[in-house]
Amino acid sequence: MHLRDLCGCLGRRSHSSSVAPLATSQYSTLCDRCKALELDDVTIGGFASSSEDGQKYLKLDEDDRYKDIEIDYYRHDIYPALLNIRKSASEGCDFCALLRDSILSPEFKAALVKDEVDISAAFYISIKLNYRWRADNLPDNYECKRGLASLEARLTIEYEERIDCSYTFRFAIESTPLLHSNGRNSDSSLTTQGLCEKWLRLRLNRTGYVLSKERVAWLKGEVDRFTEEYNPPPQPSFIPTRLIQVDCDVARLVQKDDILESRVGPVRYAALSYCWGNKEEALSQYKTTKSTLVARLSGFEAHKMSEVLCDAIQTARALSLPYIWVDALCIIQDDIEDWERESIQMGRIYENAHVTFFTLSSNSCTQGFLERQPPRLRIPFRSKINPPVEGAYGVRLQRIDSNWSVGTVTVDSYIEKDLELSNWGTRGWTYQEQALSKACIWFGTSRIHFLCPEWSFTEGDATQSRALPHFQLDHINIPDQNADSLCWSWYANIVEQFTERLFTNPTDCFPALSGLAQNFHKTLGGEYLAGIWTADLHKGLWFSCVKHPTSSFPVLLEQLMRPEVYVAPTWSWASRQGVTYHSRNPIHRIDLYLHFYMKNIRKAYRKIESDMKLMGFDQFGRLKSGSLRVTSRTYDLQISPNRVRKPQYFEDGELVVDSENRTIVRCECDWAGSLTDVGNHVVLLLLGHTPDDLLLPSTEASEPGDDDEIPENRLAYGLLIYNAPKSENFYRIGIFLSRSKDGYGTALFRGCEEREIVLI
């Protein structure tokens, strides 16, 4: 039986190994202006070079360095009408159509809103194009050292009579086979395109159905090799509450008790990590509810199953796995108690899976991941230096960068590009699923990748890599770590990455991290307070929102007072988006998680008492409310516009100075405005202190006790807090530090009385 018939019993659509042919031509249609995209290897200064095996390829200089190749293209238009681009697209130019759709995409609209551009008003835009050659940081011995890497469209906004913002639309360039009119690849077209691919050193993308016999054999081999060589400690007693049985004619849900009765040996199952999609797609997804549980145990209705589920079952069958776990079906979705129980053991489900499928190329449950789509654009190429080389290269939108990230050069491996292109890599639940899985198969836009804690391997590469573009729990040997190192891993690795992720339901934040928290708790112990460990509360509370500040203080205050849904108290990182514990410049803002002086940091509060109310019975799960009663010194800082300064040398935050122009404190607000937005004063809550010379380790041997006075000549740090209206409670609104070498530091708090502050 052919592999793609393995799921025939599901009644799903038949797959085709070919890509649908273009209507009139193998190449995209370009208007006169866009014909400038057609690359001339003589004009750009290229010459032929040869590899050790005699294969000819194009170089632009002897050292084969990175280079921007300018394109003779400049265009003016008006956003959002795009009159010129729309006209050209309507007349048949495929690149203008791609550019139009990219500029009008929700992603670009979101970028404009984030940069506070008024999208309700029209404004002029200008566009320039360039190619990027050798735009990667790959090691010299990497097998596929690429040449023509990407196309960039630099869009500049002329807004309110000034040039305000610029954006770069990055289009990935890849090899794409030419097709005959029947949509199939001929031997001659593959040979010709192969020469083009090698000459320009293009990223390879083979379109069509991905579960070929060769790929399945390779994946089976990698999974078996991992199982034999890595050999993680088995937990043969663990079986999920429910699994989907696929080694039968009709896939069906099975209960744990039924599996135990019939099993012989360990239960091998796959797990699925995927995006549900928007609310409409999630609601329409084939799932298990109280009313459908009996029917799901009898068998699945093939015509109702989602595309991603059908592909997951095909993949499990191809790899000879009898079961697969999919959350939408293995959790009773409208049963709160069942959802709570299953979310608690979610970590164990992924930890004990024989292999996990990650659907990077699918954006929702309605999209499958086994059909690799061709690029939208095919630009023709014929070499003038090496005439036998003729073919095309594909172009597809990769990402949109705002002006401050334009020009960054990132690692350009297939595996990282597929992660970068995916919606999967932005979703909250998928972070833990990846971190806890052992053997992983990523189904990317261009390639399939096998990853495990020890190595990664990409389809078609000759050698494996030890560079893994993601965090896995097994990268940390938790039992061998001390509390300081574990807390560093939690905040600086996990929290910083996790808070960049997005949730359809924001209240899923803590449940989506519960499995990882359980693993850390085994060693750290203590309490888990809204994502912060009591083992180092004086450091865990001190995070920065400088990467993603709220737009203004009134907006922040409204969010703190009346959140749309309650997720976490204001002192928790979970109440913010994209926090950081690292400092971009630790000379100006201390980094509490630099190993060099981490042990020299002392807490300055006398005590902290917590009052946490859980939504369910998962101690690492959803919260109803949470507060901290902190007994510590506070300082009422007077502020006025003439005393608040912007720091020099690209430092973050603001300085508050005294009458002699000495810096009293350095502040980072949780919003994008000024400290003066608060009014004429703000309260400083002291959390801790550390040696002021951050480049020299302290010789202090012990931590001061609760009854000790705060020592002088140390750097002080803590929270900016704001009295909640009509309440005695406080909100966290930022962070501060004060240096003794500026004449302040811990001395600022020496005459201050201790207060009892309730943070909510």
Image (tube, rainbow, N blue to C red):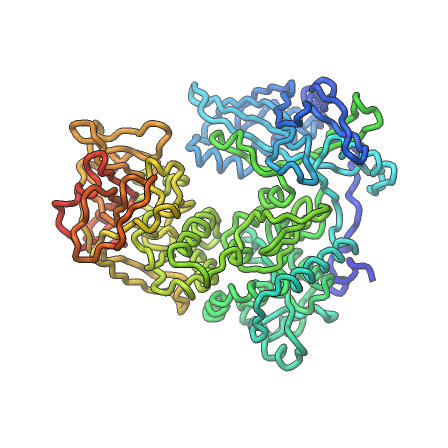
Residue 651's quadrant in the figure?
top left
Along the line of sight, which residue is nearer the eye, 34 or 698? 698
* Residue 480 shows up from this direction: yes
Q: Position of residue 98 (x, y in %)?
A: 64, 32
* Residue 375 shows up from this direction: no
How many numbered dots are placed on residues in this image?
Answer: 0
Q: Position of residue 265 (x, y in %)?
A: 66, 76
Looking at the image, residue 488 sits to the left or right of residue 399; the answer is left
Looking at the image, residue 643 sits to the left or right of residue 442; the answer is left
Q: Position of residue 334 (x, y in %)?
A: 50, 67
Q: Quadrant of the C terminus?
A: bottom left
Along the line of sight, which residue is nearer the eye, 289 or 367? 367
Along the line of sight, which residue is nearer the eye, 708 or 253? 708
Looking at the image, residue 257 sits to the left or right of residue 186; the answer is left
Residue 143's quadrant in the figure?
top right
Q: Position of residue 9 (x, y in %)?
A: 76, 65
Please report the residue visible at 67 percent of the width from the left and 29 percent of the height from the top: 95
Residue 452's quadrant in the figure?
bottom right
Please report the residue visible at 46 percent of the width from the left and 71 percent of the height from the top: 337
Please identify the residue farthest to the bottom as the structure is shown.
Answer: 261
Q: Is residue 25 above or below residue 538?
A: above
Looking at the image, residue 131 sits to the left or right of residue 571; the answer is right
Q: Quadrant of the N terminus?
A: bottom right
